Amino acid sequence: MEKDKEYVLKQAKENDVRFIRLWFTDILGMLKSFAITIDELETALEEGMGFDGSSIEGYARIDESDMIAMPDPATFTLLPWRPKEHSAVARMFCDVLRPGGEPYESDPRYILKRNLKRAADMGYTYYVGPELEFFYFKSSESPEVLDRGGYFDLTPLDVASDLRRDTVLALEAMGIGVEYSHHEVAPSQHEIDMRYTDALTMADNAMTFRLVVKEVAMSYGYYATFMPKPLAGENGSGMHTHMSLFKGDTNAFYDPDDRYHLSDVAKKFIAGLLKHAPEICVVCSQWVNSYKRLIPGYEAPVYLTWAVRNRSDLIRVPEYKPGKEKATRIEFRSPDPACNPYLAFSAMLAAGLEGIEKGYELPPPTERNVYEMSEEERRELGIGMLPEDLWEAVQIAERSELLRRCLGDPVFEKFIENKKVEWDRYRAVVTPWELENYLPVL
C-alpha cells in the first residue's frame, strides 16, 4: 500500500497533475465525484477526504452524514480528455468509510468486496467480462439516430466510427483493455467489449467506461446513452456478462471429460443463477425501461433456460475451443448496461455460489428456440420466466433472502424503497401511446 501511495505521488508530480477527482457511486450506480488539488493528495491518501453523505442516494441520514472517501491508489489514472500540461486531471476510485475508519455498509464497492470475500473463502477468484451496448443520438432531447447500420456493418466512414475509435483509445490510455468494438443490431447502436478481469477491477472499469463513452460523444456534439430500450421496435442494449471462477491459475469451470466441458462447480453455479435469476433481476435490470427490453423477439432473454451456443437462452455456454481451457465460461444475458455493476456482479456471484454451496442440480440444456415453444410445452418442461415489469421484479426481490444477504439490510431496504417510488411515478404518467390510442375514441 505504501508503495502504491508513493507511486501515485510520483506519477502526479511527473505528469503535472493539478486536480484529482475522487469517484464513488450511489446505490443506483450513479457516479459521484468531487475534486481535490494536488496539495491535498498526500493527506487524502493517508486519511481520506470527508464529505456529506446525506444527499447521496442510499447513504446516510442527515443526522449521521459524515463520510470519508478513501482513495484506492491502485485506481489512479489520468483523464485523457482533460489538458495534459500544467493542469492535468487524474482520478481515483474511493472506498467509503465511516468517520472511525470502518467500511460503510451502504457503499456498493464494499458490498462487492464483501461478496468477493465469500468467494475467496471458498477458494475462488471471480472473473467477469461484460459486453456493454449503447446508442449514439444527436442529442439527449430525442432519440434521433446518427446511422442506419446493422450488426457488424462496415459502413462508409461516418462519425460513429470515429466515436468508437476515440473511445477505445481513451479507454486504453486509462489502462482498460479492449477486445472488440463494432456496430450492433439496431440503428446507431454500438458495442465495445472490455478484456475480462477480476470483478472489482471490472466494476470500476464499467463505471469508467460509461463516462468515457459519454465524454467522447459530447466532444463531438452528440449524446451517448446506456438506456436499455430507447427505440421502440428495435433491439435494446444489454450487458451480456461472461463469468468464470478460478482456483489459482486453474479455471474451476473446466472439465475435459464432460460433454460440455463444464465442471460440477460450473453446473452448480449455472443452476444457482437459473434458480435465483428472478430474485436478482431487480438489480441486474433495475429501471422501468429495462423491462421494455426483456420481451420476446428482440434477442433479449425472457425464459429461465441455458444452452450451448443458443442466444435465445438466459445463460449461454460459449463453445469450447481446444487448448483454451482458461476461456471456459458462462454468459448471463439478462443484465443491461444501466445497472449498478458493483451490485449486479455481487448478485450474480451470490446466486452462483448459492448453487455451489447447496448442490443445486442443473436441468438439461434447452437447445430448441424457447420462443417458438407453446406455453404448454414450456410449462411441461418446467421453464420459468423473468419478471415482466419492474413491479413484479420488486415483489419477487422483496421476498428474497439471498438478495438481502448479498446487499445487506440497509442497501436492500433502500433499493427496494427507491424502486417502489420509481414504479409509482411511472404508473401515474399518461403516455403518448395512451393519448394516441384512447383519446380519439373514448
Image: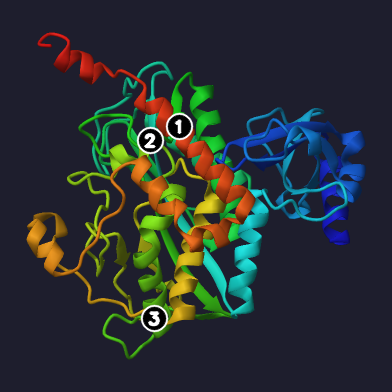
- Mark 2 and mark 3 lie on one chain; the one further toward the N terminus is 2
The amino acid on which the numbered mark 3 sits, given as a three-letter code, is Gly
**Position in image of residue 178 (x %, y %):** 49, 52
Q: Is residue 422 left or right of residue 274?
A: right
Crowding at mark 1 (Cα within 10 Å: few <14, some 14-19, many 20+): some
Q: State yes or no: discs 2 and 1 in contact (Cβ < 8 Å).
A: yes
Crowding at mark 3 (Cα within 10 Å: few <14, some 14-19, many 20+): few
Judged from the image, the secondary structure of the residue bearing numbered disc 3 is: loop
Q: Which residue is tagged 1?
A: 422
Q: State yes or no: discs 3 and 1 in contact (Cβ < 8 Å).
A: no
Crowding at mark 2 (Cα within 10 Å: few <14, some 14-19, many 20+): some
Q: Which residue is tagged 2?
A: 288
> CA–CA distance between discs 2 and 1?
8 Å
**Residue 162 - label:** none
Q: Is residue 128 left or right of residue 105?
A: left
The amino acid on which the numbered mark 2 sits, given as a three-letter code, is Val
Q: Is residue 41 visible?
A: yes
**Position in image of residue 403 (x %, y %):** 50, 58
Q: Residue at x 32, y 20 (%)?
A: 144
